[in-house]
Amino acid sequence: MTISPYLNFDGTCEEAFTFYAQCLGGRILGLYRHEDIPDADIPAEWRQKVMHVSMQIGDDVLMGSDGMPQHYQKPQGFFVQMGFKTGAEAERTFKALSAGATIIMPIAETFWSDRFGMLIDRFGIPWMINGGERQVEKRA
């Protein structure tokens, strides 16, 4: 079994995934537009929007689409969490994703990792970036 985040956008999916490919070193596996749906009655202004995209990032896949306006909802109640072996990798990724973002928690050292930070990117997607995890002693 695999679990892959599926992100929904309000018309900016292609721009977002181009940005994510640059920031995360991802590779777009496939991109399909709403105009590719057979026999679909799609408004002209929406035909070039993304119906589905998938991107390989390391061993994981990130997917997304542009939600039709009547179905789109602003992301809430989740974060896409990325864990890195080192704090340096986490810091580099956080900095890249920060372009135009709202910083929820600046990236910094925590008791559980070398670096941890939270942001909502310029496309409205919430991210948690963690790197250099430490073993934390459990209390009874």
Image (cartoon, rainbow, N blue to C red):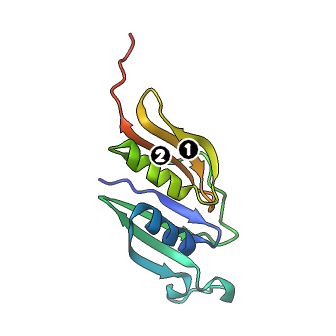
Q: Picture coordinates of residue 90 (x, y %)?
A: 43, 47
Q: Picture coordinates of residue 48 (x, y %)?
A: 58, 85
SS for dot 1: strand
Q: Which mark is residue 9?
A: none
Amino acid type of the residue that numbered disc 1 sits on in the rendered structure? Met
SS for dot 2: strand
Residue under circle 1? 118
The residue positioned 35% from the left and 30% from the top of the image is 134
Residue 78 horizontal side relative to residue 138, left or right: right
- Few, some or many C-alpha atoms within 10 Å of disc 1 (few <14, some 14-19, many ≥20)? many
Please determine whether, in this image, residue 66 is positioned above or below residue 43: above
Residue under circle 2? 129
The residue positioned 53% from the left and 47% from the top of the image is 79
Residue 34, can we see it?
yes
Identify which residue, 93 or 47, lies in the foreground.
Answer: 93
Label 2 – label 1 distance at C-alpha = 6 Å
Amino acid type of the residue that numbered disc 2 sits on in the rendered structure? Ile
The residue positioned 47% from the left and 30% from the top of the image is 110
